[in-house]
Image (cartoon, rainbow, N blue to C red):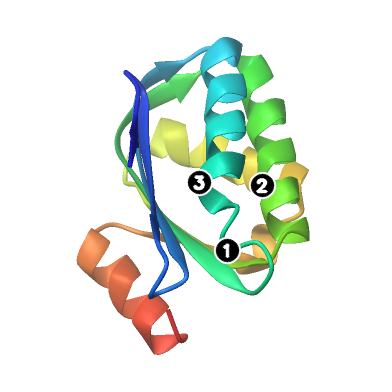
Amino acid sequence: MTFSMNFTIEADLDRRLIREKIYGIWKEETAILYHEEYKRVAEPLVKEKWAKLVDLSNWKSSYPEVVDRIGRHLCWCAENGMVWSVNIIDNPVTIMQLERMFAIGGTLGISKMFRTIADGDKFLKGNGF
């Protein structure tokens, strides 16, 4: 598991799932560090289909440049085997930012939003993860 002040990333190799927790307000430097660390953690999974479960319940918002950078991160994920992006979120402001990230990354069709981790996890288990 990887820790920083603004995120944790953990690969569950048995379920082919990456679990993330996102915190606070992100600046571009955070997004760059996140993507580099993400690629390292995801490396054992990218040869086949995998999913992500992202806990955004403590995410505040991001600077505008982060929206584009995370959109590109989502594009990388989709190009490298991600078939579901399940996001736990309930803040209307951050939901709008997240939707823009999905659009930029081309992942609107595979990105889902739920209010609880239990609901998101249920969806993933129902889809083979």
Q: Which amino acid does label 2 sit on?
A: Leu
**Which dot marks residue 45?**
1
In the image, 85 versus 3, the foreground residue is 3
Q: Which amino acid does label 1 sit on?
A: Leu
In the image, 58 versus 39, the foreground residue is 39
Q: Residue furthest front?
A: 44
Question: In this rendering, which labeled residue sits more in front, label 2 or label 1?
Answer: 1
Measured from the top left, where is residue 55 in percent x and y?
A: 32, 47
Position of 79 with respect to 96 (left or right) is right
Measured from the top left, where is residue 37 in percent x and y?
A: 53, 33
Measured from the top left, where is residue 116 in percent x and y?
A: 23, 59
Q: Residue at x 75, y 42 (%)?
A: 104
Q: Which residue is the site of mark 2?
A: 74
Measured from the top left, where is residue 93 in percent x and y?
A: 43, 31
Q: Residue 122: which quarter of the image?
A: bottom left
**Cβ–Cβ under 8 Å for marks 3 and 2:** no
The tag earlier along the polypeptide, 3 or 2, is: 3
Q: In which quarter of the image is the C terminus?
A: bottom left
Q: Can residue 77 be seen in this view?
A: yes
In the image, 36 versus 57, the foreground residue is 36
Q: Which residue is drawn at 56% across and 69% down?
A: 50
Position of residue 44 relative to residue 1, above or below, is: below
Q: Residue 8: which quarter of the image?
A: top left
Q: Is residue 63 visible?
A: no
Q: Which residue is drawn at 75% across and 48% down?
A: 75
The tag earlier along the polypeptide, 2 or 1, is: 1
